[in-house]
Image (spheres, rainbow, N blue to C red):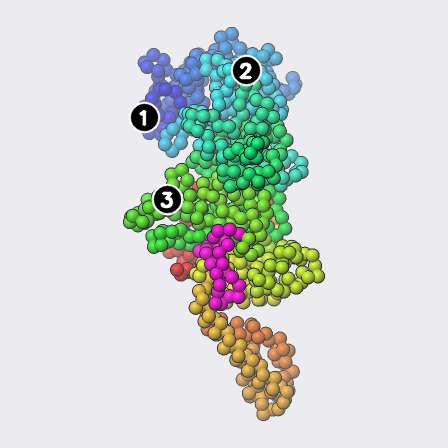
Amino acid sequence: MSKIEYKPLKEKVITGEKLPLIKVGEEKGYISIGHDGTKITYLAQGYNNNFTDPEEQVRAELYVDLIEKYKYESDKDIIELEKYRKIGHPHKKTDIKMDIVIYDKEKNPFILFELKSPEEYDKYFESSIKTQLFEPAATEDKGRGVLKFLIYYTRWYDEDGKSHEKYETIDYIKYKSFEEWEEASRPNLRYIPKNYGVKDKPPAFIKGKEEQDLRINVKKEELDRIARELHNILWGGGKYQNELFFNLIGIFLTKIYDEKTTQEGEPYRFQIFFEGLEQELPTKTYKRINSLYKGEKEPKTGKYSDCALKRLLNYKDEDLDKVKDIIFDIPKVKYVVEVLQDISFLQNKYDVLGDFFEKIVRQELKQTKGQYLTHQNIVDFILYALNLDELTLELINNETRLPYIIDPACGSGTFLIHAMKLVDKVKEEAEKQGKIKKDYATQEFLDKNFQRLRKNAWADEYIYGIEINSDLAMASKVNMVGNSDGSAHIEPQDGLIDFNNYHDKLAIKKESKVYPFPLNDQFDVVVSNPPFSVTVDRDTAKQFPKLYIRGEKIAKTLKTNKELEVDTENLFIERWYQLLKESGRMGVVLPESVFDTTSNKDIRLFLYKYFWIKAVVSLPHLAFSPYTQTKTSLLFAQKKNTKEVEQWNKLWAEYEEEYRELDFEIKKLLKLEKEQGKNKFIELLVELLGEENFDPEDKKLSFKELKEKYEENINEEDLKWWVFKNVSKEQDYPIFMAHAEEIGYKRGVRKEEKRPNQFFNSEGEYSNRIIFIDTKNPKTILDYLRKYVTWKR
């Protein structure tokens, strides 16, 4: 804004402050605004308009700046507003409006402005520059080469009352069409000329220097527009889709590294530098970005210079030997830098990296069989259904720690990122509300783990992920690093292999009295959407007999096959048990077949034996469309302690013995086939099948008739299910069940449609979303679940 000390024009009107004129000193009025705030008059131009229009408010603020800050005369011959020109075919000319035109002393057009409200700036970015700047510019300039700049512009005030502006300044002398500007990667001169001056070079982005530092107020609309641009430019024909995606992830990492390591007062290296008014050659940008990404090798020592992979992902020199350059073609690397250079990934008031990263992942990562990215609505529902918010506060106050959280099939890290954000949010809100203990130990813990420049430093100790796809694991690491998570404990390994293949906390092994294989037993929370029915190779399957109850069966099958499609979701259920501490919680996505098919009865028995099932929430078929229509459900369960499993085993043994005796007696009677054994047979039959499966009228039948009617039922009766039925009656407890028909979205291949959300009520979007929980007057599934499901500690 100009140096004049006054509130935003809009605020003056809202507060009812009298504003007949805005003046410089007492000499000259520029603008008159009616007392009711509906009409604005530009005095020198004799032009008036509706001041309630957001775009008009942008123009009024810029108009004062053009006079005061940029030193242009206020008369109509210099600044013309709302100028119309006819463009098009001579017989079909149409009027097109130019918001502001600045003329030089010879009355030649010098700058042409197209203005937009902040809400419309990104929405109409391309179309407006093309049709409302370049098209009228040709008519205005008439081939004389006098029009020098086209500027696409908006501005706004933040919640602190600080003015912000955003604009693209296009060199019209050099680029006469939108296509030429597009071909050159849309260079932005990044300044508004002052008093007809042309700078020797546009200003660089410099850390800590006011008006030259990176923008920290980037909003969702701009990120959406940039994501669309990246798709159109980089993915064009869809060739090398995942290869391009992972190179883009490398560029994200490089930008994060640049922001973290650039010194105050120094120019950022992740930007396009100018040599005079000419941009540096693409090859120069390309070389610098790759140097930041993977470093440069010193021939004599073989050591690599400091770089993003070394500093942020802990790559060793021998690792860097295997890393390829970022392999977009050279102009595309320059283009991506141009698009992202002025945005701060780390200091933004909004979660730029998280929201942008998530959008890019969803759009550009090709979904593979069995592995589909989980929507944020599902992720947030799972985290709140697990009461992660309450667990976090309880652990801070009672154990001076945070929950240990893991996803052993973490993909791009969506569950871990949102869990991390929720923990951070809980801590901040609890501090504001005075819910955190004030003792020295607790405060020391918070100071160490929630640092000013690394607010998620605590995640270095408490957040873990495993991902079999090494490139996706890297994407997850970059996502975590960009959210200040510490060291990003993401293991690029198979989530189902032996713990010895991992390191540190993941490699810990403990023996169990009630489970036949080693446990990790380290985590409070497991959250995951594992790949379903994945092909397993023979070498991997060789490990399974020493790791899983069903491992021997899988390994035997693979003796005659090089590879086999396995119900990996069942193995993951065992892996979650192995990872969790006693009373640890899990919230996971599973195919519905786990809950209702005969082939999966063993894993259901495993779940009941080793877990308390808390809730099952069925999802609609569209949950993971368009990638798959597989019907899925969410399972919430709490791991039993050793004593609880022993109680189950004791009951199981008792009923197993009872079944064998019952089975023996029934078969003995069937063999004898004597009428006098009829009453005993009916008694045993009811005990075996249950009263609900025996018709009382059948007591009138003869022994022979009873045998003929029920023999098939007797033969079909299964020991395990009979025992389970009786054990579960003795250990009967409520399980919350719900079916979500609407979950807030419906995804297409490239577009997401908003739908009603039965999961929860919320306000805002993405990382700024607030989720409301009302257990007194429940309406949503989350409300009811939080009311009726309790988790013990």
Residue 545 disc label: none
Q: Is residue 36 visible?
A: no
593 sits to left or right of 117: right
The residue singled out by tag 1 in the image is 17
The residue singled out by tag 2 in the image is 148
Q: Nearer the viewer, mark 2 or mark 3?
A: 3
Q: Nearer the viewer, residue 363 or 676?
A: 363
Amino acid type, callout 2: Lys
Q: Name the residue: 40% across, 22% down.
A: 1
Q: Dot 2: what SS?
A: loop
Contact between labelled residues 3 and 1, with CB atoms less than 8 Å apart: no
The image quadrant that residue 94 belongs to is top right
The residue singled out by tag 3 in the image is 448
Disc with the residue nearer the chain's start (2 vs 3): 2
Label 2 Cα neighbours within 10 Å, binned few <14 / some 14-19 / many ≥20: some
Q: Nearer the viewer, residue 119 or 196?
A: 196
Please provide the residue range marked out in magenta: 502-526
Q: Name the residue: 50% across, 12% down.
A: 103
Contact between labelled residues 2 and 1, with CB atoms less than 8 Å apart: no
Label 1 Cα neighbours within 10 Å, binned few <14 / some 14-19 / many ≥20: few
**x then y, percent, for residue 344:** 47, 32
The image quadrant that residue 564 belongs to is bottom right
By secondary structure, the bulk of the magenta-drawn segment is best described as loop
**x then y, percent, for residue 135:** 59, 21
Let me know if residue 513 is in the magenta part: yes
Mark pair 1, 2: CA separation: 40 Å
Amino acid type, callout 3: Lys
Residue at the top extreme of this rendering: 106
Q: Nearer the viewer, residue 615 or 11?
A: 615
Q: Nearer the viewer, mark 1 or mark 3?
A: 3
**x then y, percent, for residue 215:** 45, 30
